[in-house]
Image: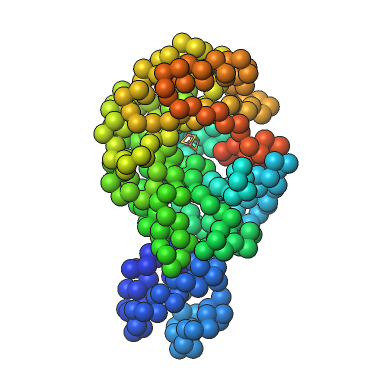
Amino acid sequence: MVDILNLTFSELESFLVERGEKAFRAKQLWQWMWNKYTRDFDLMTNVSKATRAMLKEHAEIVWPEVVTMQKSSDGTTKFLLRLRDGALVETVLIPGSNGRLTQCLSCQVGCAMGCTFCSTGTMGFERNMTMAEILGQVLVAREYLQDDAANPTLRNLVFMGMGEPLLNMREMMRSLESLNSVLGLQFSPRRITVSTCGIEKGLRELGESGLAYLAVSLHAPTQELRKQIMPKAANWHLNDLITALENYPLKTRERITFEYLLLGGVNDSVEHAQQLVRLVSRTKGKMNLIIYNPSEGDPYKAPTEEAVLAFEQVLWSKNITAIIRKSKGADIKAACGQLKAEQQALCGE
Ligand code: SF4
């Protein structure tokens, strides 16, 4: 059986032609799967009976299964999903001020990067997710929202859930291409952000594809401190990362988003802010300052309000756009990887 949700449009055409079908059937199937969120071949009424019979014999459409869904008091909705091999991943819907939603997507089961502030990082890496599994998260959300692709409430996608996108480059790129399809999910590159902790291999390819905006997690202004906070990411020296970002292909008016998680007493001083200014002023970027929101037993503490404001002030005084972001969904543990860690603890895995 072939999971045809895992085929790009051209792969779907080849799948059909190899089985004696006309290539135009790919367009019909693609619309049923990605635009009308249909999993049952019998509901595909404009597909001939013979083709449906062939599909039932050779193909399947597999969505992730929703294990739990939790809604936070601030409207953040978190899904724990089970993939066909039993692996658990999570995806989060985050409400924006305009009533539109952003979905945070996972791209790997677990993560090899071991960032010290992240619960996914402590789980280690299990496996890459396939395109069907990555985009299956969007299908689950769209079905839950009863969303219309032509006028969606689900506005933006960010690859900022479990996993490092640039370490699953093949499936990431296939997913970005399929997201772009006007016959399917209809997410233009302007509505997609890929967030990386900075991986040399793949960065250039992503930029040249023009298929998504780039966000880079810095979290430290010096190589030494970054090595403490993000030990594996720091294998690529911070200066080399910044040089690569200086040369990153950007469209007119496009900027790189830098993510900087403010950890109380660790990376949140005025001196750190000044070092950060020196580091990023060579690039075309803007800064998201994220206030760390610890749970019990976490290794870091939240920054004080004074430290956050002083940090922000240093950036603005040097003409760097800085926006303070609060972690959403704190009451449902919507930070990366936390729900899965809880679920596994409950299951005794
Ligand atoms: Fe992996 Fe992202 Fe967590 Fe770092 S923050 S360990 S890259 S999931």
Towards the viewer: 267 or 323 = 323
Towards the viewer: 349 or 21 = 21
Which quarter of the rendering shows the N terminus?
Answer: bottom left
Residue 348 placed where, x, y %?
Answer: 67, 42
Total marks shown come to 0
Q: Is 2 above or below relative to 190? A: below
Q: Is residue 204 left or right of residue 219?
A: left
Residue 229 placed where, x, y %?
Answer: 47, 23
Res 214 → quadrant:
top left
Residue sitting at 36 percent across and 39 percent down?
253
Which quarter of the rendering shows the C terminus?
Answer: top right
Res 337 → quadrant:
top right
Residue sitting at 71 percent across and 37 percent down?
331
Q: Residue furthest right?
A: 73
Q: Is residue 102 left or right of residue 234?
A: right
Q: Is 84 above or below relative to 87? A: below
Residue 344 placed where, x, y %?
Answer: 64, 43
Residue 9 placed where, x, y %?
Answer: 37, 67
Answer whether residue 344 is visible to the viewer in this image.
no
Residue sitting at 26 percent across and 34 percent down?
247
Answer whether residue 199 is visible to the viewer in this image.
yes
Q: Is 41 above or below relative to 320? A: below
Residue sitting at 40 percent across and 63 percent down?
181
Q: Is residue 86 left or right of residue 107?
A: right
Towards the viewer: 348 or 332 = 332
Q: How was this image coloured?
A: rainbow
Q: Residue furthest top?
A: 271
